[in-house]
Amino acid sequence: MLKRPDQQQHGCATPLYLVLVAIVPMVARSQSTFTPFQGLTLEGKANLQTIEAVRRLHESGQTIAVETIRKQLERSSCQLSLPSTNSTRLTAQQIRQRAEKAYLRMGWVYQCIKCDQWHVTLAGGYALTTNGAVATCYHVVNPPRDLRTGALIAADRVGKVFPVMEVLAANRYADACIVQVKGDGFTPLPLNTNVTVGDTVYCFDNQGERDAFAQGVVTRFVKLPERRLENVRGAPLFVPLRIQVTATWELGSSGSALLDECGNAIGHASTLTFTNDSARNSHETPPPQSIFHEATSGKDIFSLVQTAK
């Protein structure tokens, strides 16, 4: 869990910030007396299939080296042709369908330094272009600390696995990243940076056996401390912006798009903030823990893009 340095503690309140990547260890076996799918959930079966697909991609040289990804995460911008913002209001069902078509599971399938199991750490992402530029969180793309070997991949809703070919641009302070996925024919979401408090928002994510589609509103904007990208010479100071919403998401939802009423992406799920203000009389019942859902803003995602002419 991560504490954010810009927050003040009031009384005994302790805010905690949790990034949303779920880690699922899986072991793939092939002995003739064992059926790999025997006794597994649908999610477990999907993870085994993903592991086997990643092994094939890795063996055929279609994945990029971990050190290359670490270096490319220093890129601060890329050039893309983005779809125009949609101005037609849609029904909730139409928004869900758009979000579902654009959605990709994103993350790492890897072996760690401590064991021989394969770990599946997939969260969310969404297409920005038809040819595979995909937005997600920086912390989803950043290689796990205990990684020994593995690959950064994307997977669609039917389980097809696509290798990530390149990190196009990233900003760790904004928790924003754009990667190039191998493939074509993706369904992109336009970006909308014109968002105000009270706007209706929707969030779709898919983790294994469940689809989640939540509706809420923008409650406030949270400005983080001023930052400067260390790897960019002469980079100006900027203020990362989070969008706090009442739409909910869970562990493993990082990078899932937040959509407005016209089906545009206004940001993506980034963190859960837990608070429990315990400044009270000792005989009082402790209040329930509050959970705040904060998203990387479309503004910070758009700042990674130099619009192609």
Image (cartoon, helix red, strand yellow):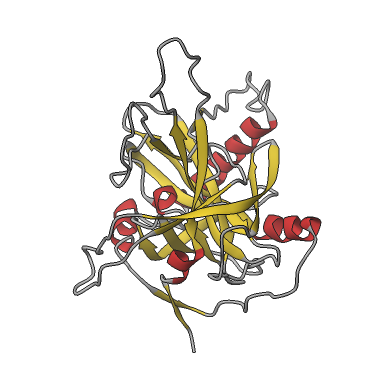
Residue 281 occupies which quadrant of the picture?
top left
Position of residue 89 relative to residue 198, above or below, is below
Q: Is residue 72 left or right of residue 151?
A: left
- Above or below, 277 against 91 in this view is above
Residue 299 in the image: state x and y as whole percent.
47, 67
Residue 169 appearing in the image = yes
| Residue sitting nearer the eye, 173 or 69 | 173
Q: How many marks?
A: 0
Q: Position of residue 144 (x, y in %)?
A: 36, 41
Viewer-proximal residue among 106 and 245: 245
Q: Is residue 299 left or right of residue 39?
A: left
Residue, far top: 283
**Residue drawn 26% across the image and 60% down it:** 227
Residue drawn where x is 29% and y is 63% of the image: 74
Q: Nearer the viewer, residue 45 or 143?
A: 143
**Residue sitting at x 33%, y 69%:** 76
Residue 135 location in percent, x, y?
Answer: 51, 61
Q: Quarter-wise, where is residue 69 in the image?
A: bottom left
Quadrant containing the N terminus is: top left
Q: Nearer the viewer, residue 138 or 48?
A: 138
Residue 181 seen in this snapshot? no
Asked whether, in this view, residue 249 is left or right of residue 278, the answer is right
Question: Could you say where residue 88 lies in the image, as x and y percent from the top left?
Answer: 75, 73
